Image: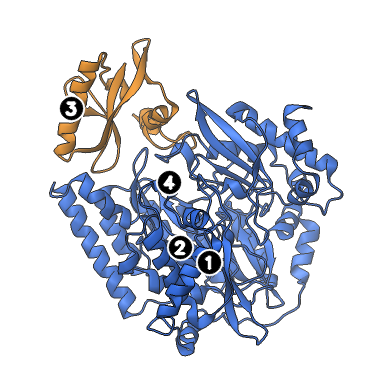
Amino acid sequence: MYRYDEFDASFVSQRTDQFKDQVRRRLAGELSEDEFKPLRLMNGLYLQLHAYMLRVAIPYGTLNGRQMRKLAHIARTYDKGYGHFTTRQNIQFNWPRLEDTPKILEELAEVEMHAIQTSGNCIRNVTADHFAGAAADEIADPRPYAEILRQWSSLHPEFSFLPRKFKIAITGAPHDRAAVQVHDIGLQLTRNDAGETGFVVYVGGGLGRTPMIGRKVREFLPEEDLLAYSEAILRVYNRYGRRDNKFKARIKILMHETGLEELKADIEQEFEKIRFGVLLLPDEEVRRIEAYFAPPPLEVGSATSAAVEARRASDAAFAQFAAHNLNPHRVPGYTSVTLSMKPVGGIPGDATDAQMDAMADLAEQYGHDEIRISHEQNVILPHVKLDDLPALYDGLVAAGIAEGNAGLITDIIACPGMDFCALATARSIPVAQRISERFGAAERQAEIGELKIKISGCINACGHHHVGHIGILGLEKKGEEFYQVTLGGSANENTSIGEIVGRGFSSEEVVDAVEKLVDTYLGLRSGKEETFLAAYRRLGEEPFKEALYGAA
Amino acid sequence: MKVITANRLLNGDVVWLAGNGNWVERITLAKAFEGKEAVAEALALGMVSKDRQEVVDVYEMDVTVEDGVIVPVRLREKIRATGPTTHPDLGKQAQAVSA
């Protein structure tokens, strides 16, 4: 994986020193809260309902055992013994003291991590497919490009005061697991007829209060133009993006108000001006960065493992795990394993310090020391030998992270909601927990099959509810929590925004409503292979609406 | 009825204004103010504390008094006063048990 060069190490260290001094001045009363707030936000430090919250960047969701162990150490030493993995592949600590944050940042810098640009109106952590570098269907590993974008966007002076935050996602496979079409810039690696690598480029996707699917601005952007073209997009946005209204400041609104053709022309015009300048990506530089992401030495083996088959036959829980939590690896004899952070009835995305330590140990022992965080709030060991799977599974059972529910109805994305977040209008996590308990039985989950439920506690949509097969949005109505349900959303290569089916539900009613939707699907699906989403797309909303509200 | 609330600068802890003008870490120890003038006066006191860099995010919030105990009206403030409903072992609710 990528290792800091002298420049990276020096800027992170300088930034840590700078923030240490800013905290000192704040505590000494030399800086007011109004002066300090933008500074702390630039370093990922928020103030939430109960305490400060520190959001630590995990670039493109990739880390190693040493880094995971450091996160465990921070959770144990400076927080309350746990961390929360987020939908942007980051981790949040919910209880740090302001005076401890400089020390936390110093500890992070020791393992080449930081919290820079995890907040504020700048280019945020670039996210990527969590199976990057391992997936059988991958054209190329997207992480070298994500790293190149990270280097370009870190402390970019021109883009440190954008109209609003800016999120980039990249996928290396035709099956999009990085939700690129709901990002400000979405990049999909592709090859042209000549076999050259490039990108399909989407601009103006986003969720939040105005969900929009990104528009394709380039069918094929050559690799060497990645930075110049990105810079052109950002320049156009920085110049024309609205600054008069925070809620209309994202590039999706600019795309919507300007129109695809005009905005595309603006981008292309800017691009032509800077195309062959300093941002031209030389082939040797891409290959140099790529070398950091060279796969570990993997011995080609058999596509099936006798050890796995034997265990599968004798252990139903293992069989369930193996059926759902493995992703095909490009090297026969290996698999990518999802460690579910969604125990039945548990808090989506939470991991204790002990679990983080266990994941670090298991990654080192069985996973070539590679770990990924997925935007679905799970942890991935991308390179596991099939023969090692039973032993790994035993380690996961011991750590309490062996739920075999990846992609199933209990693998729910939920934002922190009103239990933590100052912006939330309702709680999300307890709804996720109750749904998880309702459908927690292994056979029932397996019978229902792939179903993505995503829950947000306010219209800012951190829980991605717009792209949930079933989306749940928590609002406040007359002082009570109130949940609006959307159906048919999806964030893969066939992205769609879910549709509101009708009036919302009280907290007491919402789990029953989900059950009615699931039962309706089970009754109407053409067969087990037709997923909830496929059935919804075939049947339309009527039967689901009728199940929820009765015949019109 | 209203109480004045804020978060402590140093650790972000939720606090409320008591009758003696100090910040307290239990809403039950806070003072409820009635009437525009009393609330404005209390809020001004909170703002002075903010200017002294003791707390941040000072604001007034609605409460009722039930059996002599101050209870927040909005769920958000109920959660601030007790802790995350998902983690009964954390926040003020946990301190209350261990105290």
Q: Please give the label number shown on residue B58.
A: none
* Picture colour for chain B: orange
Q: Mark 4 points at which residue?
A: A247
Closer to the camera: disc 4 or disc 3?
4
The tag earlier along the polypeptide, 1 or 2, is 2
Chain identity of mark 3: B
Q: Name the residue under label 3.
A: B44
Q: Is mark 4 on a helix, strand or loop?
A: helix
Closer to the camera: disc 4 or disc 1?
4
Horizontal side of A40 relative to A376 (left or right) equals: left
Q: Please give the label number shown on residue A371.
A: 1
Chain identity of mark 2: A
Q: How far apart are marks 1 and 2 (CA)?
A: 8 Å
Q: Please give the label number shown on residue A68.
A: 2
Q: Mark 4–mark 2 contact, CB under 8 Å?
A: no
Q: Distance between the residues labelled 2 and 3?
A: 46 Å
Instruction: Tell me which chain appears blue.
Output: A
The amino acid type of the residue labelled 2 equals Met
Chain identity of mark 1: A
